[in-house]
Image: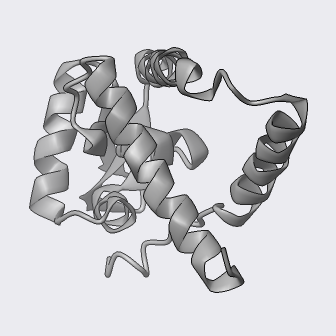
Amino acid sequence: MNRDEIIPSIVISAHALARIAARQAHNDTPSAQWRVLSILERENGQRVGTLATAARTTQPGMTRLLGDLERTALVTRTADAGDSRATVVHITDAGLAALRGWRDEFRITLAPHFDDLDVVDWATLARAAEILTTHSRETLTTKEAGE
């Protein structure tokens, strides 16, 4: 594989693994829910528009999703102290627990797909995961969301 193919291959493979894990675990929760909770885990206290931009959805779609997440006590919404017209979203302890459970479920479901890896392969994946984590840090801003 040449250098130009590596990053796209990683992204496509990651999406495929997520679909495989969701299907095999019979997890029908929308991926947008996990995406929003993951964003809030990294940077809690985000405005709705900022979350919509980060999750690559519309603001009305995000508002609907947040209503579902709030009804299940995974997030809370409050008025922005600096602008009472805006809403700020926070992940709850239940949201963090649900996110951990989802990650555990995916780890357990996908583990058999990696049974044939040896110590060298695991070390390679560990290093790749460190690199990807470092290079996937997002800084969310209200400017990006047009707020």
Question: Looking at the image, can residue 47 be seen?
Answer: yes
Residue 43 higher or lower than 115, as above or below: below
- Quadrant containing the N terminus in the rendered view: bottom right
Q: Nearer the viewer, residue 3 or 64?
A: 3
Q: Residue at x 65, y 61 (%)?
A: 137
Where residue 113 sits, quadrant-wise, is: top right
- Quadrant containing the C terminus in the rendered view: bottom left
Colour scheme of the picture: one colour
Q: Position of residue 51 (x, y in %)?
A: 35, 58
Question: Looking at the image, can residue 75 be seen?
Answer: no
Residue 19 higher or lower than 27, as above or below: below
Q: Nearer the viewer, residue 19 or 57?
A: 19
Where residue 27 sits, quadrant-wise, is: top left
Q: Count the labels in the image.
A: 0
Q: Residue at x 53, y 14 (%)?
A: 108
Q: Give left or right: position of 125 versus 76.
A: right
Q: Position of residue 4 (x, y in %)?
A: 63, 85
Q: Residue at x 10, y 59 (%)?
A: 60
Where residue 135 sits, quadrant-wise, is: bottom right
Q: Position of residue 35 (x, y in %)?
A: 38, 45
Q: Residue at x 24, y 30 (%)?
A: 69
Q: Position of residue 28 (x, y in %)?
A: 19, 26
Q: Give left or right: position of 13 versus 86.
A: right
Q: Nearer the viewer, residue 1 or 4?
A: 1
Q: Nearer the viewer, residue 76 or 21?
A: 21
